[in-house]
Image: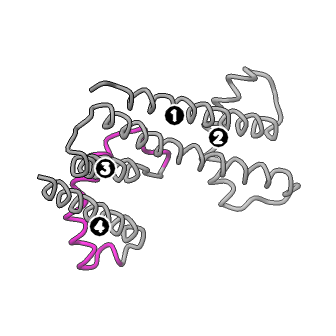
Amino acid sequence: MQDIFLALASVVQLYSFLCVIYILLSWVPDLRFSSVGRFLSALCEPFLNLFRRFRFTRIGPIDFSPILALGALSVVSMTLNRLARTGTFSAGYILAAIVQILWSFFSFLLTLLLLFLLVRVIYDFTSGRKMRSDFWIMLDNFLNPVIRYVSQLFFRNRNVLYRTRLLVTFCAVLIVRLGMEIAVQRLTLLALSLPV
């Protein structure tokens, strides 16, 4: 039985690797429509499509659902490896793994958001009155929904400098990320302590 679980875990890991290759190929249209790209598309797209239905994985034109899909495969692989090693199946372990995978998804998004906000703050302090390129306009379009939401919470309808709103949004997102990380750690420990 142990060999079966190990074999299944290896299959899942191989499939995860193929999905990663397909995701990388999809960024290059010429490679995506090559014979290898079409083969990987037929193999991986049905699974990846299962996660594209979740709206929270899409921010503007950017689709982050592949991260969630790879996380789900990771949970399955870890579970099979645990069954191969210990022969036991723990609902608490599964719950803890799911919590960690979901957190890895959201922490990635929050870290990316923090990075973009930091870049925008630095640009705001160093650009003066220079004309903005399309990149900065696109970055503002990405960040503005979050900045508006945070500004509404803290400033209501007061007229506040954009730089101030940027800094407050950065601090708010940073606090949320740190708070969620602590909460996830405690929730994971709680799940692992479950008797089932």
Answer left or right for 165 relative to 4. right
Q: Residue furthest top?
A: 156
Mark positioned earlier in the residue sequence (4 or 1): 4
**Percent of width and height locating residue 139:** 64, 52
Q: Which residue is mark 4?
A: 18
Q: Which residue is mark 2?
A: 144
Majority secondary structure of magenta residues = helix
What's the CA distance linking mark 2 and mark 1? 30 Å
Q: Which residue is mark 3?
A: 78
Does dot 2 land on a helix, a strand or a loop? helix
Does dot 4 land on a helix, a strand or a loop? helix
Does dot 3 land on a helix, a strand or a loop? helix
In the rendered structure, which segment of residues is drawn in magenta? Answer: 31-60
Q: Residue at x 47, y 45 (%)?
A: 104
Mark positioned earlier in the residue sequence (3 or 1): 3
Does dot 1 land on a helix, a strand or a loop? helix
